[in-house]
């Protein structure tokens, strides 16, 4: 049954049917249209007020609950429902894993339309909270007020905030008291920075007017115990900058890398900016199976260190190396997978488009006394060509771990042309992975599939596929 409320529609007693894309759940309206609803769990029965209508679907929010799902758990975080970071925190972890496994299987079957083996069980994360090694927060001079705060009737005013962007609102920041994603002292560092800035009159950024002083905060931690803190300032003010950085250096002596950026651009990305080390080293060290990797402010490294080890172990297992193989590691990043599998291979060739990442890969290989890895920089579709193969040899195994967009069609074509015996495809987006597998189906069969949960409390999932030549 549906009733109108002003220009919006309220659907009553709607059963939530499934977990959908991007962490929202799915129900059906009486006319059969899909309704996307955040902060509900499959099995809930709710009244839904729509706020967006499209030709094929509605978007809405639950305004009343008639029945609570057996899959529900109580969220641990006080910010759940306002913060968009952990959209599945109200769902039991075993059910999260089931929906992630289902998403991978659906994508590979419906998009790939290829023959598939029985999937190996999804590998869950031992830690469901405090698992991230990198967090990024934003400053704002006007914090987001939650519905509960507004309804309270109290005089709230506008206050400075240090936290996360409200979903789909680029200029709205939710002030975060405690985040359950990164281990201590992450929360203490963030909260004391905010308190110190307020006490000393340091201006928080105004994203609409592009004014202010404090812009972003990045905290990186490592399994070795090392900590990196990077403050991004919108403008230079030496006195105020050093006031804050000196406070951090003295208050948190466990920080091994204290850095900053002066960035007056419209966007706050640091990859084209000069990162300045104020105290300690300009990197932290991560360790995995005896290998050490330096992580700088711009480095890509899997944000769940423990699960990264599991992911790489599965990748190495799928590769089936005997010590005699020439391995190509495409989209190698800082060379972590390449070095992780190197002791089981004759030689590994890593290719990556980001020059800084390749520089890191070479430094890490030297640090780890690895002599059978070589790294090359360049756009994959241009570098990975016939001349490259002729110079470096015909690979026996290819490991590929592309970004979310998947592999360029020219890269897929080149893999088919050189036809290695095995391809191990690691993906953070099983939809684009399925598309690429379909392109390779004429020559390769999928013989093993295993999803890996790197991000508990979210909808994100990695997937590892082994292809062998038919």
Image: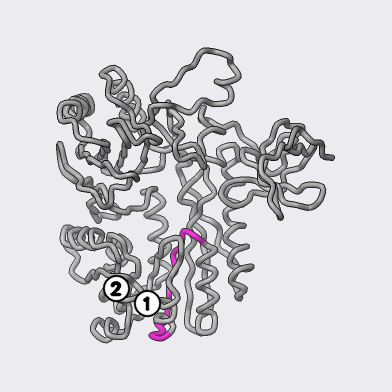
Q: Nearer the viewer, residue 114 or 5?
A: 5
Q: Earlier in the sequence, mark 2 or mark 1?
A: 2
Q: Which residue is mark 1?
A: 397
- Kindly indicate the quadrant of the structure image that contains residue 8: top right
Secondary structure type for disc 2:
loop
Residue at x 72%, y 39% (from the top left corner): 44
Q: Is residue 424 magenta?
A: yes
- Kindly indicate the quadrant of the structure image that contains residue 332: bottom left
**Residue placed farthest to the right in the image?**
1
Q: Is residue 294 above or below residue 151?
A: below
Q: Which contiguous range is marked in magenta?
A: 417-429
Instruction: Tell me if label 2 and label 1 are in contact, CB under 8 Å.
Output: yes
Q: Residue 143: horizontal and vertical position, in percent?
A: 44, 27
* Residue 361 falls left or right of residue 174: left
Residue at x 35%, y 70% (from the top left corner): 330
Q: Residue 413: horizontal and vertical position, in percent?
A: 43, 81
Q: Residue 101: horizontal and vertical position, in percent?
A: 58, 56
């Amino acid at each position: 049954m549906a009733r109108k409320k002003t220009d919006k529609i309220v659907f009553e007693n709607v059963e939530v049917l499934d977990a959908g894309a991007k962490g929202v759940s799915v129900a059906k309206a009486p006319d059969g249209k899909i309704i996307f609803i955040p902060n509900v769990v499959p099995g809930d029965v709710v009244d839904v007020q729509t706020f967006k209508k499209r030709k094929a679907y509605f978007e809405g929010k639950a305004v009343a609950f008639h029945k609570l799902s057996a899959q529900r758990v109580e969220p641990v975080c006080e910010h759940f429902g306002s913060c968009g970071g952990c959209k599945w925190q109200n769902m039991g972890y075993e059910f999260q894993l089931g929906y992630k496994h289902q998403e991978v299987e659906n994508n590979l079957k419906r998009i790939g339309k290829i023959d598939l083996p029985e999937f190996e069980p999804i590998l869950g994360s031992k830690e469901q909270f405090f698992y991230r090694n990198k967090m990024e927060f934003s400053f704002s001079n006007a914090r987001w007020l939650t519905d509960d705060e507004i309804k309270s009737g109290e005089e709230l005013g506008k206050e400075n905030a240090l936290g996360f962007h409200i979903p789909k609102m680029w200029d709205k920041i939710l002030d975060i008291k405690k985040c359950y994603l990164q281990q201590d002292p992450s929360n203490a560092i963030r909260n004391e920075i905010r308190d110190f800035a307020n006490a000393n009159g340091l201006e928080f950024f105004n994203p609409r007017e592009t004014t202010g002083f404090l812009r972003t905060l990045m905290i990186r931690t490592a399994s070795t115990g090392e900590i990196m803190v990077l403050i991004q300032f919108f403008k230079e003010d030496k006195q105020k900058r050093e006031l804050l950085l000196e406070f951090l250096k003295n208050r948190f002596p466990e920080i091994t890398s204290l850095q900053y950026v002066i960035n007056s651009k419209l966007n706050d990305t640091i990859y084209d900016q000069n990162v300045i080390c104020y105290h300690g080293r300009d990197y932290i060290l991560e360790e995995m199976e005896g290998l050490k990797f330096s992580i700088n402010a711009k480095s890509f490294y899997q944000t769940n260190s423990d699960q990264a080890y599991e992911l790489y172990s599965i990748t190495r297992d799928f590769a089936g190396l005997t010590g005699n193989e020439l391995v190509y590691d495409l989209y190698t990043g800082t060379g972590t997978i390449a070095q992780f599998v190197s002791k089981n291979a004759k030689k590994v060739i890593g290719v990556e488009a980001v020059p800084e990442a390749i520089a890191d890969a070479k430094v890490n290989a030297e640090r780890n006394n690895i002599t059978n890895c070589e790294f090359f920089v360049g756009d994959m579709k241009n570098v990975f060509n016939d001349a490259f193969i002729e110079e470096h040899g015909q690979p026996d195994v290819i490991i590929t771990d592309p970004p979310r967009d998947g592999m360029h069609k020219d890269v897929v074509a080149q893999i088919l042309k050189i036809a290695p015996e095995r391809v191990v495809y690691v993906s953070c987006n099983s939809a684009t992975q399925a598309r690429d597998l379909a392109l390779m189906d004429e020559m390769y069969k999928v013989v093993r599939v295993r999803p890996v949960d790197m991000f508990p409390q979210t909808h994100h999932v990695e997937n590892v596929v082994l292809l062998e030549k038919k």
